[in-house]
Amino acid sequence: MSHLIPIFPLELVVYPGEALHLHIFEPRYKQLINEIAGSKELFGIPSVVDKRMEGLGTMVELEEVTNVDDSGEMDIKTRGRQIFRIAEVVKQVPGKLYSGARVDFTENELAGDEELMRQVLSGVRLMHKLLKVEKNFNKPVGVLKSYDVAHHAGLSLKQEYELLGLEEENQRLDYLNRHLSQILPTVIEMESLKQKIQLNGHFKKLPGVEL
């Protein structure tokens, strides 16, 4: 059975459990947030990729309105909940400024292989070390999910969306693992090239070549 929900299309991917902070300034979305503030109602964020609204998105819970200025613009804290698939878009909800959609909720398997997660984490940490990025996930391996690390694995927006469509945790971990195995050699090569450039002009201690 499809559910009619208000939607807020954005050029990003929201994963279940993810904290997302937004600045709300458009009249239609100020209306949406004002209507659900203080309630337990959720709204949907369908992903926009290459300027096109895709068929998948994530239900989002409004956790807090942290600031409202004189114009009604506001800063909000939200959290991703359940993934949905759009069955029909309602360009304008009757009597409202914002759009809606009839959606079906997808099944989602969250249990995954711990060793596979360790491999993914190892790849992510190596990439972060090479790029001099600091990120602490603050969760033990047995608790971490693919959604916790996906935004930190160097995926493109299109790849993040592809991962959103995978309904099993091991599928998502395998996707991240394969991506990291492809991107890490390039990052390592870039780091090596950077070091060569930085050393250019320095005194070099090299052995002679026998002829």
Image (tube, rainbow, N blue to C red):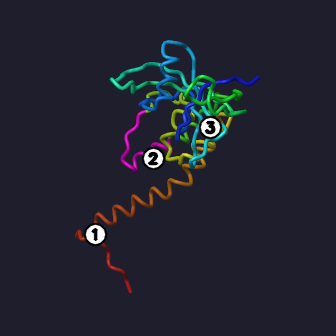
Counting from the top left corner in percent of width and height, residue 94 is at: 63, 24
The disc at residue 164 is 3
What kind of residue is marked 3? Leu
Which of discs 3 and 1 lies nearer the camera? The answer is 3
On screen, residue 195 above or below 100: below
Crowd around label 1: few <14 · some 14–19 · many ≥20 (10 Å): few
Q: CA–CA distance between discs 3 and 2?
A: 24 Å
Q: Residue at x 42, y 45 (%)?
A: 128
Counting from the top left corner in percent of width and height, residue 66 is at: 38, 21
Q: Is residue 107 magenta?
A: no
Point out the residue furthest to the right here: 1
Counting from the top left corner in percent of width and height, residue 159 is at: 58, 46
Q: CA–CA distance between discs 3 and 1?
A: 44 Å
Q: CA–CA distance between discs 2 and 1?
A: 26 Å
Q: Which residues are magenta?
A: 122-136
Q: Residue at x 64, y 41 (%)?
A: 54
State which tag comes first along the sequence, 3 or 1.
Answer: 3
Q: Secondary structure at mark 3?
A: helix
Residue assigned mark 2:
126
Tell which of 52 and 202 is nearer to you.
Answer: 52
Tell which of 129 and 84 is nearer to you.
Answer: 84
The disc at residue 200 is 1
Q: Is residue 125 left or right of residue 60?
A: left
